[in-house]
């Protein structure tokens, strides 16, 4: 699962050896600061891994963390909130990353809408002369 918060982009997966545990991964160590503090865990670094930084947390702890993030949500526009944050180099890069994901999502939406339009058009070709479906 991918999650983008104000303070980080997280990739969350089930622990391979313990279903009660999740691995919260990130590409930037700073992105794990909130969950590491919340779970009272150390950030581990794995230089050769796809996501270099990670924190292991119990599922229930991560669920509580996400509930806290949801209860803190106080903005109508996520991209704008990222822009309003303290302008550290990492925050600026995170904002640009979020914008790239937003643009990719916008493109995805256009493609899917186009596919739906095409399938509707094809469906109208399947109506017989009498107006009954063939």
Image (tube, rainbow, N blue to C red):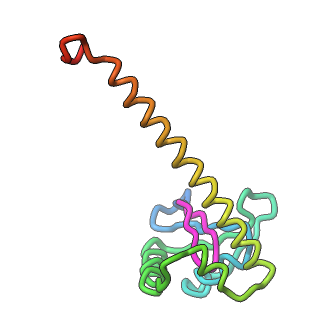
Q: Taking 61 as reference, is 83 left or right? A: right
Above or below, 76 against 96 in this view is below
Please tell me which residue is depicted at 63% across the width and 59% down the height of the picture. Answer: 101
How far across and down, in percent of the image, does residue 32 sit? 65, 77
**Residue pictured at 71% horizontal, 88% vertical:** 86
Given residues 66 and 57, the one toward you in this image is: 66
Residue at coordinates 73% horizontally, 56% vertically from top-left? 50
Image coordinates of residue 3 in percent, x first then y, are: 55, 67
Q: Is 2 covered by the magenta stretch? A: yes
Q: Tally the marks.
A: 0
Above or below for 2 versus 95? above
Residue 127 magenta: no
Q: Is residue 108 left or right of residue 42?
A: left
Q: Is residue 53 left or right of residue 116?
A: right
In percent of width and height, residue 14 lies at 52, 60
Position of the C terminus by quadrant: top left
| Vertical side of 41 occupied by 58: above or below | above
Residue visible at 22% across and 18% down? Answer: 133
- Which of the 4 image quarters holds residue 99? bottom right
Q: Position of residue 29 (x, y in %)?
A: 73, 75
Residue that extends furthest to the top in the rendered view of this protein: 129
Residue 100's quadrant in the figure?
A: bottom right
Looking at the image, residue 62 sits to the left or right of residue 45; the answer is left
Asked whether 50 or 111 is in front, the reply is 111
* Main secondary structure type of the part rendered in magenta: strand
Residues rendered magenta in the picture: 1-12
């Amino acid at each position: 699962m991918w999650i983008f918060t104000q303070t980080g982009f997280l990739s969350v997966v089930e622990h391979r050896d313990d279903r009660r545990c999740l691995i919260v991964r990130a590409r930037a160590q700073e992105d794990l600061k909130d969950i590491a503090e919340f779970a009272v865990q150390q950030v581990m670094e794995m230089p050769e891994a796809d996501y270099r930084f990670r924190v292991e947390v119990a599922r229930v702890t991560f669920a509580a963390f996400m509930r806290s993030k949801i209860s803190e949500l106080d903005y109508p526009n996520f991209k704008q909130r990222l822009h309003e944050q303290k302008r550290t180099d990492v925050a600026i890069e995170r904002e640009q990353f979020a914008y790239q994901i937003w643009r990719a999502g916008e493109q995805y939406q256009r493609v899917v809408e186009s596919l739906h339009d095409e399938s509707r058009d094809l469906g109208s070709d399947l109506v017989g002369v009498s107006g009954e479906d063939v």
